[in-house]
Amino acid sequence: MPFGEVVIGAPGSGKSTYCHGKHQLFSALNRPISVVNLDPANDNIPYPCAIDISALIRLHDAMDAHGLGPNGGMLYCMEYLEANFDWLEERLRELGKDAYVLFDLPGQVELSTNHESLKRIVQRLGKIGFRLAAVHLCDAHYVTEAAKYISVLLLSLRAMLHLELPHINVLSKVDLITQYGDLDFNLDFYTEVQDLSYLENALSAASPRYKDLNMAICSLIEDFGLVGFETLAVEDKHSMLHLTHAIDRATGYVYVPPPGSKRPPGTIDDPEKAASARENTYALMSSAAGSMVGTRSDVRDVQERWVDAREAWDAHEREEWRREGEMVRRAADAAKAENQAKVADTSGIRVRKPV
Ligand SMILES: Nc1nc2c(ncn2[C@@H]2O[C@H](COP(=O)(O)OP(=O)(O)O)[C@@H](O)[C@H]2O)c(=O)[nH]1
Ligand SMILES: [Mg+2]
């Protein structure tokens, strides 16, 4: 059964970068992954693209042919894709039954909030067997202002209600969050969408005229009780692994490596032991059933990493990378020395073994 993610979010929220990062991570973990570009305006695609909508339709061609602007052209492209769904279906089938597919979508917000084409495409993907989750990226800088945070909450809620998929909202680029000013509350207040009445002061200071309207929106969001956020810093492996785990839980995906497959370094899978006694770090990294405990799985750790002690953590990580680099260099030197010794041995030259 193929699984996948529908990656949505406003322009610049980090969708294509996320798809690229996930492609690199999954390739390193030997997990299957294919990225499908469904954004006809994506000119510089950073990842290897399994299917590209521009082979079906290009934004500029649609705009020229029908005298449309960029936004109208984009909606036309999505409607065209819907009308030619068999084109997509045929190519998806070629990816195999066990494919894990990321769909990189355009940033037009209406596609995931009120336009029907994406919703119908998603429904048809479900009918051909895909188990999908929507991954909605929202730039984390919106949480630095109460009014912007409310608009992001509303947008996320609307997308959840429209697409009707298991839904993961993500505050992306959390590594940049301190660049936009101080947070009024700790990060967990924003990710867990706790008691929004705390925003009252900030909202009435920013726009006293609309205070009541803003508070009514807050209570509407609270009444639904649906919106919450994960965080993402795409270059932080722990952040990516945690998000992967949250998405696997939402779709029910459990990765079982095929027999005889290459294992990621460091995993232990001793076939001699009884199944119940076998350590299997695959399960830790990729099983939907495992607990969510891990580095940076708690939003308070994310706060410490990127807000409270960012510089200390940066220095620590630099030191870790330096040490890793040193180890790799030493291992390469040792391998080279061993090779040279072997060559010398076979050529009859006696070499003294290093002590
Ligand atoms: N610092 C940082 N920058 C990011 C992150 N994710 C994306 N970006 C940057 O945000 C910009 C927009 O990203 P892009 O993937 O093109 O956004 P898209 O329009 O949603 O596909 C690019 O310059 C990325 O390098 C992140 O996690 N951290
Ligand atoms: Mg993009």
Image: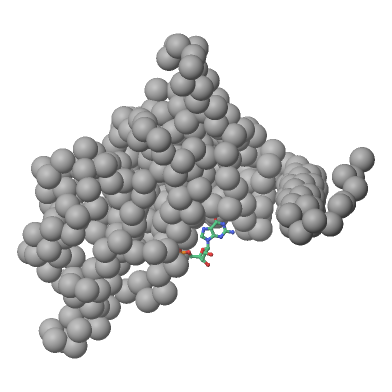
Does residue 234 show up? yes
Residue 29 image offset from top left, x and y in percent:
48, 43
Residue drawn at point x = 25 percent, y = 83 percent: 60
Residue 227 image offset from top left, x and y in percent:
38, 37
Q: Is residue 107 left or right of residue 95?
A: right
Quadrant of image for the C terminus? top right
Residue drawn at point x = 36 percent, y = 33 percent: 259
Q: How is the image coloured?
A: one colour
Residue drawn at point x = 56 percent, y = 50 percent: 233
Q: How many marks?
A: 0
Camera-nearest residue between 80 and 265: 265
Residue 151 image offset from top left, x and y in percent:
40, 51
Compared to residue 85, the image places residue 241 above or below, namely: above
Compared to residue 146, the image places residue 54 above or below, namely: below
Residue sticking out furthest to the front: 348
Quadrant of image for the N terminus? top left
Q: Is residue 343 left or right of residue 287?
A: right
Does residue 145 show up? no
Camera-nearest residue between 316 and 221: 316
Q: Is residue 6 left or right of residue 92?
A: right
Camera-nearest residue between 3 and 261: 261
Residue 43: quarter of image: bottom left
Residue 154 image offset from top left, x and y in percent:
35, 46
Residue drawn at point x = 40 percent, y = 23 percent: 289
Compared to residue 240, the image places residue 73 above or below, namely: below
